[in-house]
Amino acid sequence: MEYLSWDLATLSRATHYPNLSIASTHVGLSQPQLSRIVAKLEDQYGVQLLDREARRKSSWTPAALRLAEIYMQTAQSFRLEVSTLSSSMAMRQLRVGTLEGLVPVAMAFCRAVLVKTSVMAVHLDVLDTGPLEERFAGNDLDMIFTARDMGVKKYPKLCVLGYQSLQRMGSGEELVYSMFEYTSTSHKGLPTSKTFVSNSLHVRQAWLERFGGSGTLPSAVRRTKTGHKEEVTVMAVAHESMPDDLWRECKAFLKHPI
């Protein structure tokens, strides 16, 4: 757009300095280059931007200062409009990730977002801890449900949902692990016991019920602590880029889901 040109942006920066000579040393252009840009703008808008007969050579005219002011106001308005457009577009769809053990909570939240906000599509991906955090850090997910402390200082849009116990099931020698448990144990891929590994909570639960073995399964999310030694904090975390008004709505749904 003509009124948001690079030439006007250059003039706007240059008018912060008393004359053409000093300005050229601060805007990254030689004096002849800056002079050509000013002459081009004078011809384009039909106004005199430099007082070439002034005692201090080539000082700015009131018209130059006013043109720079108009540009700054227009550019700021343009940026605000683009930001508003970006926010409104971002609210049309929401990308959510969750651990499988938090699917009931995540589903209730997604339903509330669809029913009560302007969001038109919600994508819910069920992931292991590692991929969940990697995709969130890579901005591939707008919001996640996790049972690992993400840090409120790093992610200020964070809401604690409750608590979940990791319960040991079975007593057999055969181990039933999630992928996260398997890769984080001390054997580092060299098991010392017979081990079944699946990234599906449903599959691990079915295996323990049908074939036995020993594994850890998460309980339902509770609002209050029980003191269980394996208890973890469950939270929802959103990127700072999420519009503030949508985040306020999300927090309300998290505390009182449909």
Image (tube, rainbow, N blue to C red):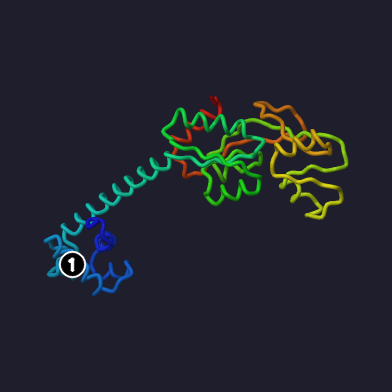
Label 1: which secondary element: helix
158 vs 9, left or right, is: right
Residue 37 lies, in percent from the top left, at 22, 68
Residue 104 lies, in percent from the top left, at 62, 31
Task: Give the number of marks.
Answer: 1
Q: Quadrant of residue 62?
A: bottom left
Q: Residue at x 46, y 37 (%)?
A: 121
Query: Quadrant location of the N terminus?
Result: bottom left
> Alpha-carbon neighbours of circle 1 within 10 Å: few (<14), some, or many (≥20)?
few
Q: Residue at x 55, y 26 (%)?
A: 257
Q: Residue at x 37, y 46 (%)?
A: 83
Residue 231 lies, in percent from the top left, at 73, 34
Q: Which residue is mark 1?
A: 40
Q: Nearer the viewer, residue 243 or 173?
A: 173
The amino acid beneath tag 1 is Lys
Q: Is residue 75 above or below residue 52?
A: above
Q: Nearer the viewer, residue 137 or 106?
A: 106
234 vs 244, left or right, is: right
Q: Nearer the viewer, residue 134 or 121?
A: 121
Q: Residue at x 28, y 74 (%)?
A: 30
Q: Is residue 120 above or below residue 50?
A: above
30 vs 61, left or right, is: right
Residue 66 lies, in percent from the top left, at 19, 54
Q: Quadrant of residue 129?
A: top right
Q: Residue furthest front?
A: 210
